[in-house]
């Protein structure tokens, strides 16, 4: 279910969520690597996590 939810994200959101929350990079490290501002990465991560939650919870409701 998690892989399905991750695949539903945009590339930018998926990249930010995985790098920050799975790999463990800091926002500053990811910012340096991608050339994207920290505030943009925080926004991508926030929206990506929100979309993941919505996808997972909607899947749980339909499984009943």
Image (cartoon, grey):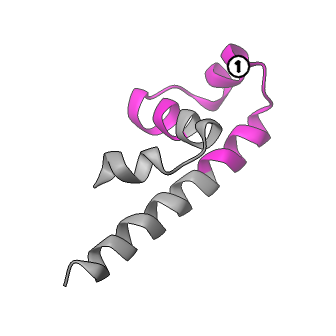
Identity of the residue drawn at 60% across and 47% down? 45
In the rendered image of this protein, does residue 54 appear above or below residue 25? below
Residue 22 is situated, as x and y percent measured from the top left of the image, at: 39, 34
Residue 44 is situated, as x and y percent measured from the top left of the image, at: 67, 46
Left or right: residue 40 versus residue 51 is right
Identity of the residue drawn at 69% across and 38% down? 41
Identity of the residue drawn at 45% across and 39% down? 21
Farthest residue, direction top: 33
The quarter in which the C terminus is drawn is bottom left
The quarter in which the N terminus is drawn is bottom left
In the rendered image of this protein, does residue 48 appear above or below residue 30? below
Identity of the residue drawn at 51% across and 34% down? 20
Residue 14 is situated, as x and y percent measured from the top left of the image, at: 53, 40
- Say which element carries label 1: helix
In the rendered image of this protein, does residue 48 appear above or below residue 16? below
Q: Nearer the viewer, residue 6 or 33?
A: 6
Left or right: residue 57 versus residue 28 is left
Residue 30: within the magenta?
yes
Residue 56: within the magenta?
no
Which quadrant of the figure has residue 11? top right
Which secondary structure is most common in the magenta stretch? helix
Which quadrant of the figure has residue 63? bottom left
Circle 1 packing at 10 Å, graded few (<14), some (14-19), many (20+), is: few
Pointer 1 residue = 34
Q: Which residues are magenta?
A: 17-45
Q: How many callouts does the rendering have?
A: 1
Residue 46 is situated, as x and y percent measured from the top left of the image, at: 62, 54
Left or right: residue 27 versus residue 51 is right
């Amino acid at each position: 279910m998690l892989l399905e939810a991750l695949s539903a994200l945009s590339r930018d959101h998926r990249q930010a969520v995985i790098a920050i929350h799975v790999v463990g990079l800091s926002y500053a490290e990811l910012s340096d690597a991608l050339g994207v501002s920290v505030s943009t990465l925080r926004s991508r991560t926030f929206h990506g996590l929100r979309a993941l939650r919505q996808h997972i919870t909607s899947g749980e409701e339909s499984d009943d």
